[in-house]
Amino acid sequence: MAQLSFYLFGSPHITLEHVPIHLPRRRALALAIYLAVTDRSHRRDTLTAFFWPEHDEQRARADLRRTLHVINRALGADWLVTEEDDVQLRHNGDLWLDTRAFADLLAGCAAHGHDVTAVCPACLPLLREAVALYQDDFLAGFSLPDSPAFDDWHFFENEGLRNQLAGALARLVEGCSAGGNYEQAIHYARRWLTLDPLDEAVHRWLIQLYSWNEQPTAALRQYEQCKAQLAEEFDMKPDEATEHLYAAVKTRSLGPPPMDPAFTIHSAPPHVTTCTAAHPLRQSDDIRVVTTLSVG
């Protein structure tokens, strides 16, 4: 079969063998996306209630039939599997979703023998590729105003993906910093901060990274930005940890950065063992840096 690709980070679009597929009805696109992402069979009465909640059953079923016909005509007859009461999109090696590729890359880190919240050198290329796929939020700018159930599903899918992105960026910051690659760590930390501009932990990361990268002015400016945002949004001051870090940067008494030589390796050795001890750089109980060591 020809490759069918769903690009769902950002404004959604579909291609078949790299040729754009046009679905003239917004609801047809939404239904195709829903079938692709959920990866299972759905009963027709469930789909009609989901996508046409204001229609009676007879009219909703007719609308579903017409919408499935539109999808079938656009994608080709082999992709939709329709039975008397069930509908699903055929899932095989020729179906590709950027959201699934993102999840698979993150899951690949779990094969490295450490906790899923930890990071090792072999994780870094997978994490970089994953965050590169995430070009914008899930279905950014897309909605079905007369289908609250779809918009609710969209919201929760997006929140889950954003949380995964935040975790991936946090691990990239940890890993890049552990290898002394502060420019990349700053790049990922700045992107991490866009997900929640009021997250003081990320501001502290940037303050440290700028300081370690010999950019004290940028470090102090980051503190001022954090302070101003907290005051504007919550009428509160930075917490004690942030103030202590600011004082250390201002007096140039911030300690040297923790380093892990293993993170200067950009590819995994042929055989690895793992050490699950926490790295000194660890900022929270949620992220650990682990070292992979070649054993032959």
Image (cartoon, grey):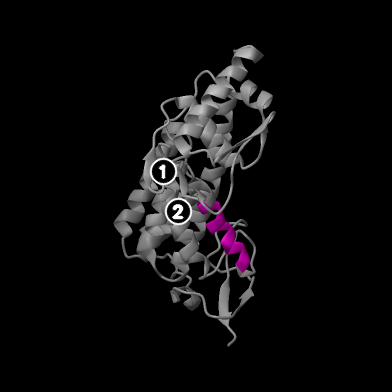
Of badges 2 and 1, the one in the foreground is 1
Residue at 53% x, 44% y is 161
Whether residue 51 is visible to the viewer of this picture, yes or no, is yes
> Where is residue 289 drawn, in percent x and y?
56, 67
Answer above or below: position of 277 versus 130.
below
Magenta segment range? 101-111
199 magenta-colored: no
Look at the numbered disc 1 and give the secondary structure of its residue. strand
> Where is residue 202 drawn, in percent x and y?
47, 51
Classified by dominant secondary structure, the portion drawn in magenta counts as helix
Residue at 39% x, 51% y is 190
Q: Earlier in the sequence, mark 2 or mark 1?
A: 1
Q: Is residue 294 left or right of residue 115?
A: left
Seen from the viewer's position, the closer of residues 195 and 17 is 17
Q: Residues within 10 Å of mark 1 (few under 14, many from 20)?
A: some
Whether residue 139 is visible to the viewer of this picture, yes or no, is no
102 magenta-colored: yes
Residue topped by disc 2: 131
> Where is residue 121 drawn, in percent x and y?
51, 71
Q: Residues within 10 Å of mark 2 (few under 14, many from 20)?
A: many
Seen from the viewer's position, the closer of residues 219 and 236 is 219
Residue at 60% x, 13% y is 59
